[in-house]
Amino acid sequence: MLRKRVKTLELVLIGASVVFLVFLSLFLRDVFSGRIILTRYIFSLKNFELRWYSVLVLSGFFVSYLLARKRAKREGVDLNQFDELVFYCVVAGVISARVYYVMFNLDYYSKFPTEVFKVWRGGLAIHGAIFGALVTILLYKFFKQPSFTLGQILDIASWVLPLGQAIGRWGNFFNYEAFGVPTNLPWKMFVPQPYRPLLYREYEYFHPTFLYESIWNIFVFATLTLYMSSYRRRRGEVFALYLVLYSLGRMMIEKLRTDSLMVGQIRVAQLVSALLIVFGFALFLSLRSLPGDEKAS
């Protein structure tokens, strides 16, 4: 009886997934063609707006958090310490993501300093969040001396991070941001004129780079899940692979973006991604070359 119920539930979930994907493809078709124009908010009440961006970023975080917490429990991590570290990482991650973004847009924010605090309008750089979280993890490990190892917690965090990123990227979709240069490809995305860069104001259709990165992040998450369950020998390997895989996709997609953070003629995300690929690859090789296997689950 239990097996029959489980099978029925699986069929229901598969059916629901198919229906959702069909609906999503039809919805995207109409948005990309310009037949549907998106609004940034779910609802508006006087001066308050509940924005899709905020909801989707928070949804990505909570899904990732629940999966990471389940994995942490399985690996014997003290969940009180885990929750405490997550809280610190979120605070540090949001602050550093904003600081990172503002640093490379000082011309604008020096003229409109109050805009610095309006994070609900976007402007959070994922590399800034990653660096802020890494520093927080290192400090927590040094001062708190928790039960988990550094490689263990980095693996758990980097395993779920691309899934959260994949969900959060859809916030860019509703904001009409993080899109690419003009294109005539079949999957081109219509962008209303107010959201187009001045350089491309006369163009209507652009690369949906938010979608490219979301799909790539799902691939990274699936790859890391498989690796963690079947191939990981030592803790830290999943973290190293995340740095390599995510950065490869980001470096390729970034060259299509119209809103890249720049230092002179250099795209900051591409430069940082290249450095992370080198570091991640070297870390992975060094961990795999160590003799013996470390218990990882």
Image: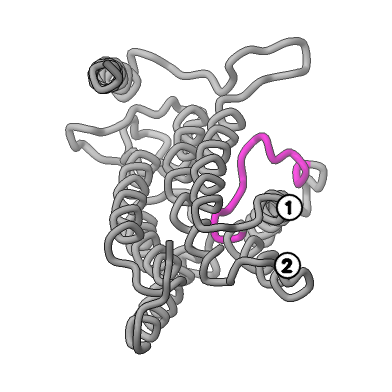
Query: Does residue 274 appear in this view?
Result: no
Does dot 2 land on a helix, a strand or a loop? helix
Q: Is 41 located above or below residue 162 in the figure?
A: above
Q: Residue at x 64, y 54 (%)?
A: 97
Of the residues under marks 2 and 1, which one precedes in the sequence?
A: 1
Q: Nearer the viewer, residue 271 or 182?
A: 271
Residue, disc 1: 84
State how many labels appear. 2
Q: Amino acid at mark 2?
A: Tyr
In the rendered image, residue 277 lying in the magenta stretch gets the answer no
Using residue 23 as the reference point, say whether residue 258 is left or right of it: right
Residue 79 spot, x, y in % from top left: 65, 50
Magenta segment boundaries in residue numbering = 115-128
Percent position (x, y) of residue 116?
76, 47
Q: Which quarter of the figure is the N terminus placed in? A: top left
Q: Is residue 296 visible?
A: yes
Q: Residue at x 32, y 31 (%)?
A: 189
Image spot of residue 53 (x, y percent): 57, 31
Asked which quadrant contains residue 224, the reply is bottom left
**Residue kind at label 1, given as amino acid type:** Glu
Residue 126, magenta (yes or no): yes
Q: Of residues 264 and 261, which is closer to you in this image?
A: 261
Residue matched to label 2: 140
